[in-house]
Image (cartoon, rainbow, N blue to C red):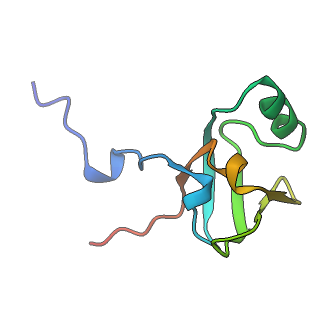
Amino acid sequence: MGQGKFKENDIPSPSLTLAGAVQGRKYKIDKISGGHGLNSRLLSVGFLPGEVISVINQSGWGPLIVSVKGSKIALGRGVAHKILVQELDQKSNG
């Protein structure tokens, strides 16, 4: 038995909403939980599952500014709450 062992680093980081993302960090889009209209609009500007985005401005109020596929996009907080992401470039503590 022992073949099912895994290391702590093998556990994927938990998803969070883009609204909770930290400025200056990169994230991978997991899921967009909006309706058909929102999903289509975001897809047209490059937001699709698996795509890597960078948070450029996250002031805690006002729009969130991210970079996706080389373009800067401003998102309202409501929209940012509907985009699930996983943080990339995590540093291990040991």
68 relative to 85 in the view: left or right: right
Q: Quadrant of the C terminus?
A: bottom left
Return the residue nearer the eye: 60 or 28: 60
Q: Position of residue 45 (x, y in %)?
A: 88, 44
Q: Position of residue 82 (x, y in %)?
A: 64, 42
Query: How many labels were placed on the picture?
Result: 0
Return the residue nearer the eye: 29 or 18: 18
Residue at image position (87%, 36%) is 41
45 relative to 52 in the view: left or right: right
Return the residue nearer the eye: 42 or 34: 34
Return the residue nearer the eye: 36 or 90: 36
Q: Residue 50: which quarter of the image?
A: top right
41 vs 70: above or below: above
3 relative to 62 in the view: left or right: left
77 vs 65: above or below: above
Q: Quadrant of the N terminus?
A: top left
Residue at image position (63%, 32%) is 33
Q: Position of residue 51 (x, y in %)?
A: 71, 44
Residue at image position (77%, 64%) is 63
Residue at image position (35%, 68%) is 92
Q: Which residue occupies the extreme left position in the image?
A: 1
Q: Position of residue 91 (x, y in %)?
A: 42, 69
46 vs 74: above or below: above
